[in-house]
Amino acid sequence: ALPICFVLATATLAALTASGCRRPAAQNIVLTKDQEQTIAEHVLAAPPATIQHKLEVKFEDKITLLGYDISGEPKKGAAFDVTMYWRVNEPVPGDWKVFVHFEAPGKRRQPFDHYGVGGLYPVQNWKKGEIVKDTVHIEVPGDWPDGPTQILVGFFDWGALTKGQDRRLKVEAGKGLPDDRLLLTTLNIGGGGGEAARPGGAAQARMPSTPAVYEVLRASEAPRIDGKTDDAAWQNLRAACIHDA
């Protein structure tokens, strides 16, 4: 007869093999009262009026990013929080995660992938009409590269990824990158801190605070185009100023 310990070990191994060693389904996780309270505090009936950076970007008509807040100072050796406000338009069944990429383009990337609300409230549990307040805590390494650093966000199917498939919720046309990541903002790390560009998509150029002034020279007759400036038309130029409104 086989030893009892061997029989138990064999039975346990068989059970794990049959289940594929998968963790329990997210909706079956038993929460403590404190955890339930945390979820309640992060599921809102309406978006707060105090959102710092308001957006309206859809992910496949299922979830809309209404905006985000940044608290703390994004600099080397320090930490800050990014809080996103997601409106649920339709349920998203499946093993989906929120991804947040803290990325110095071409140099370094630090992922902050999670299920939502610190892992307590997975995307598959989000209900239509809810506003989910989702905060990510980012600690910037002391050796992070100098220069611009992007924060990119989106949703990916973790279940599909474990099977070798890369599936993401598509970002609204014209607002995301080709790989279905939304550029939330660009930060200056090691360059004085602060946001260099926002929101999702390309950087927004700042308009000059005062009108530009251009000096234009007018010719009384057509000059000869031969690369020389001894033509009479060039010599007789008169100056005038045109002010750009």
Image (cartoon, helix red, strand yellow):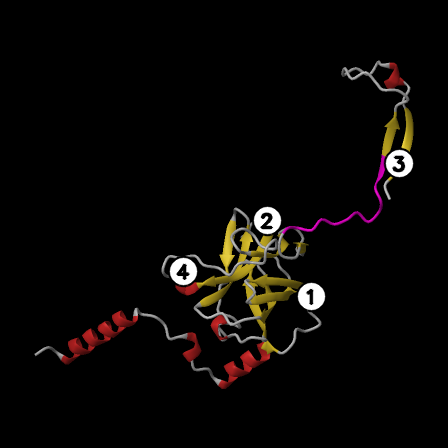
Of badges 1 and 2, the one in the foreground is 1
Q: CA distance from mark 4 to mark 2?
A: 32 Å
Where the C terminus falls, by quadrant?
top right
What is the magenta range?
202-214
Residue at image position (91%, 19%) is 236
Query: What residue is disc 1 on?
Result: 52
Of badges 4 and 2, the one in the foreground is 4
Where the N terminus falls, by quadrant?
bottom left
Q: Closer to the N terminus: mark 1 or mark 3?
A: 1
On screen, 210 above or below 98?
above
Q: Closer to the N terminus: mark 1 or mark 2?
A: 1
The amino acid type found where label 4 is placed reads: Leu
Which secondary structure dominates the residues rendered in magenta? loop
Are dots 1 and 2 in contact, CB under 8 Å? no
The amino acid type found where label 3 is placed reads: Ile
Q: 220 or 123: which is nearer to us?
A: 220
Query: What residue is disc 2 on?
Result: 146
Q: 52 or 244: which is nearer to us?
A: 244
Q: 73 or 127: which is nearer to us?
A: 127
Query: What residue is disc 3 on?
Result: 242
Task: Give the image quarter of residue 133.
Answer: bottom right
